[in-house]
Amino acid sequence: MRDWLANQEPLVPRLLRRGAASTGEQPALWTRDDGSWRVRNWRTVADDVCGAAARLAELGVAPSTRVAHIADNSYAWIVTDLALLGLGAIHVPMHTALPTAHVQRQLRHCEPFLAILGARQARLAAELPVARSVGHADIVVPSGLSARDVAAISAGEARIGEAQQMLDPNDAATILYTSGTLGEPKGVVLSHANLRANTHSILQAFVERETERRFCLLPFSHIYARTCDLYVWVANGTEMALGTRPESLVEDLKAIGPTFINAVPLFYDRLRRQLQAAGAERRPGALRAVLGGRIELCVCGGAATPDPLYDFFHEQGVPLLPGYGLTEASPVVAASTPRACERGAVGRPLPGVEVRLADDGEILTRGPHVMRGYFRDDTATAETLRDGWLHTGDWGAWTASGLLRIVGRKKECFALATGKNVSPAALELRLLEDPRIAQVAVVGDGRECLVALVVPRSLLEPAPDSVSTASDSAATSTMAARSPEAATSPVAASIAEAVGERQREWAPHERIRGLVVLDRPFTVEAGECTPKSTLCRATIEHHYQHAIEGLFAALRAAARQETPLSMMVGDAVAWNEATREHQ
């Protein structure tokens, strides 16, 4: 790996060189096929990438050709991505949890030459605005020993070699559509140099582990998993296991025994709650056992890490290392390491990554990891990239030991009618520490006070022996909603108690004065949250406008009558039915 750190050899040529060398027989990738785990070596992966490159070239894919990709994580996804990267094509992966209308809008925007569909997405072919679509099975044919296989592998390797010779590192490698929490999604253009630089920086930040076995459970349609798992794995040459079945996740962790995991906070929090439910939260070694018994590092990204979750992992002797990044930065800007980790912080900037704070506290970053810009959106590009610096839209601060801390989302902060500024995300994070609350949205921009829409945890029932990744679907991807009775008065009273307890020490203007306890969760399908479970506030407020207005009206009436109350709790079911009638 150190030779790659020295010269940053392109990822796919490195893969092919490893496959052809004596190391090609070493285990590379674990996948679950037909109920049992299968391991492929580096030679097999390299051959299958070459074979896929040959088939893509036959279809007309060439350098700078845009290719859309709508598929769940799989071995075929990995092979397709690496083949496209090797050919110099522009890979445009899309989130499988998005409604069809969103996918259609993104396809019209990027106008791909070809769309590649996974098995579950094949039914979409007739609905997609593309001239041609093919399935994974048309691209990825596992290598064998026939003359045709040998010819395809040789042809694909030649195609990749030709493309790499012509490739400019600054050429576009991928377009990734952001989650669009603050408006229409934008296509982030990342170059080959961006991906290589961020992979290089991540490997420099962490101590090399020759026997590392990482477990990948995040969707590759997000750059987090693609850079931090897939490309780091290729560059490092160790082992990776691909988890694709949420219902057997705990079983799979025990079978694989990973040493390294990248995941979002919700995944780790569900592990904690599972141990709490079993009465094993304080049992030494309980967490390590659930994670397979060999875990060395758990990296946490995609959202803020709650302090109680951080404390729980460290008390269990399993380092939980928060990091910070965004798609526009390929994605990692800062990361905690075993040598630099602190409660409430996201670590130090990666090697080669510059970070400074603007006068108002906004985090700015500069370096080879920063995107080329937004696809066909010069205005948004000019707003975000200024004087060489990427303006992240996040507020930050430095700790006394020089680690970066995230204070809040700049564009999500709003002012009350009183003039007081509020960061709803910060308040929501504190409320989510209570085990009775599954999701929450704080509302109050331009209003006299704050109210909250709350999804109670009692409304959601986890599937048996499963832990959802909540990363390519809403927070309910492996959960079933119970009946609306779950949101009636006993649950509402418990939620009001939970909020009251959490905000006792908050400033007066930060306190929640009213609640609507919802009878369904926020979902990706409804456009209320992103595949990473980030709230889409405008959509939520639109969907629950009737409930919100009713709650504020009740609060104003109570204020006029000088009725003493500490919390106003809405009739969730009745208001929600009225809300649906107005949508």
Image (cartoon, grey):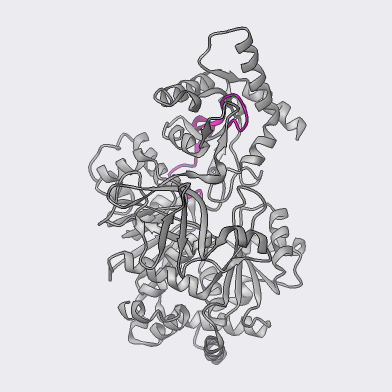
- Point out the stretch of residues depicted in magenta: 443-470
Q: Examine the rendered structure and indicate whether residue 552 appears above or below residue 231.
A: above
Horizontal side, residue 564 vs residue 262: left or right: right
Q: Check if residue 453 falls in the magenta segment.
A: yes
User: In the orientation shown, which residue stands out farthest toward the left?
Assistant: 284
Measured from the top left, where is residue 100 in percent x and y?
A: 70, 55
Rendered-image quadrant of the N terminus = bottom left
Give the image location of residue 109, x and y in percent. 72, 63
Q: Is residue 485 visible?
A: yes
Q: Quadrant of residue 484?
A: top right
The picture quadrant where one finds residue 240 is bottom left
Residue closer to the observer: 130 or 513: 513
In this orientation, does residue 466 appear?
A: no
Q: Residue at x 58, y 74 (%)?
A: 172
Provide residue 223's location: percent of width, then percent of height: 51, 62
Q: Residue at position x 46%, y 60% from top? A: 365
- In the displayed structure, would residue 378 be above or below residue 392? below
